[in-house]
Image (cartoon, rainbow, N blue to C red):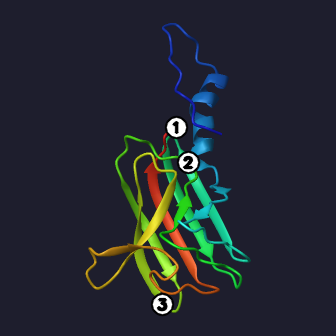
Amino acid sequence: MAIATPRTWVVGEVVTAAYMNAEIRDQWLDVLAAWVTYTPVWTASVNPSLGNGSIVGRSKKIGRLVNFQIDLTMGTTTTYGTGAWSITLPFQAAASSGSRVGNAQALGGSRFGGQVIVSPGASGVGAFFPASSAVSNYSSAAAAVPFAWASGNELRITGVYESAT
């Protein structure tokens, strides 16, 4: 269900239960509804292959505000491709929204905290992790960033952005 445009009332109009339900109850049902799943696509300059790993995306869209999370778990037959990774978003980002920052976490032998940036007009997102102790020096998640990925490792991404529609 999508949030509808509020009704424009006219002078002398009788407010009925049906109008109130559409204007108030139905809008709140959408706000309170569960998140929905989507299947993200994982790419790079030479595409990785999920193999027997898994990738699950979830989102909650209220108006044009999108909350999202992506969980990528590597399997024994997963291959990691070449180049920076990108994972599709549930909805294209608004072109005029400015960049938005979210969180990334790589879980292997250790946990690595990182960030994601949803750029204006983007349909995908990449994760960035500190390349050294200089926190301003970030590298894109890839086959060896922030570590050499292996079966059972996870990449978790969360964020909020404005959608194009």
Disc 1 to disc 2: CB gap under 8 Å: yes
Q: Callout 2 environment at 10 Å: few (<14), some (14 to 19), or many (20+)?
A: many
Amino acid of disc 1: Thr
Q: Callout 3 environment at 10 Å: few (<14), some (14 to 19), or many (20+)?
A: few
Q: Quadrant of residue 47?
A: bottom right
* Residue in view at x 64 percent, y 85 percent: 152
The residue carrying mark 3 is 110
* Residue in view at x 60 percent, y 27 percent: 20
> Considering the image in quadrants, where does the N terminus appear?
top right
Rounded to the nearest angstrom, the CA distance separating label 1 from label 2 is 8 Å
The one of 31 and 152 positioned closer to us in this rendering: 152
Total numbered circles: 3
| Position of residue 61 in the picture relative to residue 138 (left or right) | right
**SS at circle 2:** loop
Of mark 1 and mark 3, the one earlier in the sequence is 3
Rounded to the nearest angstrom, the CA distance separating label 1 from label 3 is 38 Å
Toward the top, the furthest residue is 12
Please tell me whether residue 112 is drawn above or below residue 120 in the rendered image: below
The residue carrying mark 2 is 91
Q: Quadrant of residue 130?
A: bottom left
Disc 3 to disc 2: CB gap under 8 Å: no
Label at residue 165: 1
Amino acid of disc 2: Phe
Please tell me whether residue 40 is drawn above or below residue 71 in the rendered image: above
The one of 147 and 2 positioned closer to us in this rendering: 147
**SS at circle 1:** loop
